[in-house]
Image: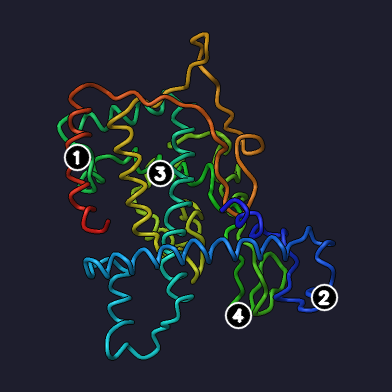
Amino acid sequence: MEIWSRVMETGATPPVDIFPFLHYIPQSLFTNWRSRATHVQREMNGLYADFLTDLRTRRAGSGSRGSLMDQVLDQVESEKPPPGLETSDHALWFLGGTLTEGGSDTSASILTAFVQAMVANPAIQKKAQAQIDSVIGPDRSPNWSDYASLPYIAHIVKETMRWRPVTPLAFPHALAQDDWVDGFFLPKGTTVIVNAWGMQHDPTRFEDPEKFDPDHFDGVRKLAPELANGPWEERDHYGYGAGRRLCPGIHLAERNLWLGMAKLLWAYDILPALDAKGDEVQVDTSAEKGYCEGFLVCAYDFPARFEVRGKAREATIRREMEEAKSVFAKYE
């Protein structure tokens, strides 16, 4: 994924889709982009093919279990597959693979940034935990029905996505019609780069934008999907992109991130790691040194401590883990 991210980064490869003649220029002039892209292709094909092979092996032994790819294969293997359904192995590799990829690396990167922010901002962490504790005791962890009662957690989700966007330049878009922007004429078909980082670190919109501060969203109660379809002036962030190519998983991702952060704050004190002398290890949260480069951006490895907030919560964590195992066991 790291290699793929570097290949996909804006400017990392020549615009061969726009200027086909660039295919004939020695790739050594463009940092050997073709070799890197071919390597990524082989790696992705192999990984996704293994996923499909494992699924078919499991189906042969125990049949369909109702997962998304089970349902797809049920249709592919039926006597009359739906017209227009792509049934090649390559298409099936990437149907399942890209769904897994799109919902894993991005969410993991945001949660990593969240942990980093909590380590570096203990006062914010304590404020969030106080709100959670006022609503939920140690006998259960937060669930989605608690959303309206925990607005500060929603602000932390939004601030994390604003502060350290996973895709700082999002995906390139093409204009569907002629447009004018600040006196410049942009014809239909123009490629537009969505500078999420720039908009989310605009000091005229967010005071002290490099500071992690959930109060940047004080009073904002709407979820990202609703804000994404509203006036641009009210957008919380561009972590899910913009336009017709908005992230199709926005509804699920927003809820998963809220649940993940709420449960972590309910369960643990997230603390700086200690060195050999017992002193706290400072985490570099700067975008320049603390985060990798690429199309997808994630924090470099950093140390942290997770301390369970009491025996009662530990018992609840173990109980809910066993309950989750029973839910997911059918898909193993």
Residue at the (34%, 66%) spot, across then down: 55
Q: Which mark is residue 158?
A: none
At mark 1, the secondary structure is helix
Q: Nearer the viewer, mark 4 or mark 1?
A: 1
Quadrant where the C terminus is found in the figure:
bottom left
Q: What residue is pinned by disc 4?
A: 177
Q: Nearer the viewer, residue 145 or 209?
A: 145
Residue at the (64%, 63%) spot, across then down: 193
Asked if marks 2 and 1 touch (Cβ < 8 Å), the reply is no
Give the x, y percent position of residue 175. Answer: 61, 75
Q: Nearer the viewer, residue 28 or 134?
A: 28
Relative to 162, does residue 88 appear above or below in the rendering?
A: below
At mark 3, the secondary structure is helix
Q: What residue is pinned by disc 1?
A: 320
Give the x, y percent position of residue 325. Answer: 22, 47
N-terminal of the two: label 2 or label 1? 2
Residue at the (48%, 10%) spot, across then down: 278
Residue 35 image-quadrant placement:
bottom right
Residue 76 image-quadrant placement:
bottom left
Relative to 24, does residue 294 appear above or below in the rendering?
A: above
Asked if marks 1 and 3 touch (Cβ < 8 Å), the reply is no
Q: Nearer the viewer, mark 2 or mark 3?
A: 2
Q: Which mark is residue 157?
A: 3
Residue at the (26%, 33%) spot, across then down: 132
Give the x, y percent position of residue 323. Answer: 17, 44
> Which amino acid, mark 4?
Gln
Q: Nearer the viewer, mark 4 or mark 2?
A: 2
Q: What residue is pinned by disc 2?
A: 24
> Which amino acid, mark 3?
Val
